[in-house]
Structure formats: C-alpha cells, structure tokens
Image: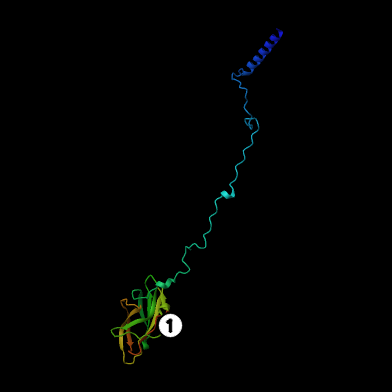
Amino acid sequence: MSTFRTAAVVLAAVSAFALSACGPSEDGAADTGSTTPPAGATASGAPSTPAAPPKAPSAASTPPAPSAPSASAPASGPSASATDADYDVFPCSTYDVTFSAHLAEPTTSSYLLKITNKSGKACRALGHPVVTFGDLDGQATQRGEAPGIEDALRLGPGESAYAGLLGGAHDGTGKTVGSIALTMDTESDLEQKPLTASTPGLYVSPTANSVTPWVDNAEDALSL
C-alpha cells in the first residue's frame, strides 16, 4: 500500500511540473519554449558567415576600346592618284577676255596687245592672236613658234597675256588703218565675237606685218 502511494505522489509531481512548463509567461503570452537566435547566428544557433563583398568587374567584362581604322579603309580626302586640276582648263575665247592695244614704236608701227581674263575660271591663251587690220583682207602673219596646247599660257581670273604686233616700216606698199580686231585660237569651230581696239595711224605693210605668240610679260612680247 505504501508503494502505491509513493508512485501516486511521484506521478502528481511530474504532472505539476509539466503543467508549469507549458503555462503562460508573465506577459500572458504562451511560452513555446523557443528563443530568437542572436544576430549573426543561423537558425541552428551557429554564427552565420558574412557575405562576400561584390567583386570588381573583371577585365573580360570591360568593353573593348574602339579599334583604329584598318590600312585598307578608303581615305576621306582626295586620292593621291587624282588627275591634275588643270585637265578641264579650256582655251580662252573672246567671251573670256578683255582686249587693248597700245603703241610701242611708231617707226615700225609696233603695238603691244594685251588680254585679261575677265571670267571666273582659268583658261589657256593658245598660240598666236588672230589679228585683222581694219577693212583690209587677211590677218597678221604669225611670228615665232608657239608652245603646244599642254604648255600654253594659263590665265587665272584677272591674269593677263601679251603679244607684240608689227605693222611694218613705211615702204610705200602698205596702207594705214585706224583699228584692229582680235579673235582667239581655240582649236575648235567656236564662233567668237571679235574684240576691237583703236590703232590710229597704224601702217600695215603687206610683206612685213607680224604678230608674236602670247607670253606672260610685255617685255618679251615686244622683243620676240
């Protein structure tokens, strides 16, 4: 009987302890028996491993620098093989120039002829001037050799060319005229309007008159 009572007492004590463990806490909330893990600890109670700092971009992820143009890329400027800029410089015509004549030597009826490029583009003074004397038939005889078309005098806008005109000495065989007319050698069938200049008292010998090719200065024009 005493053994039974002892067992009953022990059972009652165990039951009381179990009830006190599951009872409400002092603040009235049920105590579940679990606690919040401290900062830096995992749910299992072990400290957590700090997260690794972000890595800097690797060299492989850096965009490549722009590459230089290859040697085979076409150049943006003119090609070194571009043709000479003078390839389109055409012969001067009377539409491109102004004309004047000035007495240089009265005894030989020598005149200095001058043309000036009045156009906005370059042209070439080819060969000899084509000069006629007033109302006389024919044109002045060519004196001296003129350069070929490739070497002909190039006149830029405002530039001038010169030629020397010789009427000839008074030998009694010629005539006197008061003007001359000029057209240009264009090596084409271009129709030109003749340019005229006053030449008072110009004596024209039928056998001694002549005109030089175009040159770039007055001194040479009168000495050829």
Q: Residue at x 37, y 77 (%)?
A: 115
- Report which quarter residue 140 is drawn in: bottom left
- Front-most of 73 and 201? 73
- Front-most of 172 and 115? 115
Residue at the farthest bottom position: 172
Residue at the farthest right position: 2
* Rendering coords of residue 62 (x, y %): 56, 50
Residue at the farthest top position: 1
Is residue 114 at least partly visible in the picture?
yes
- Report which quarter residue 211 is drawn in: bottom left
**Secondary structure found at label 1:** helix
* Rendering coords of residue 161 (x, y %): 40, 78
* Rendering coords of residue 48 (x, y %): 64, 34
Q: Which residue is mark 1?
A: 220
| Quadrant location, the N terminus | top right
User: For the image shown, how many numbered marks are present on the structure?
Assistant: 1
> Which colour assignment does the render follow?
rainbow
Badge 1 amino acid: Asp
* Rendering coords of residue 100 (x, y %): 35, 78
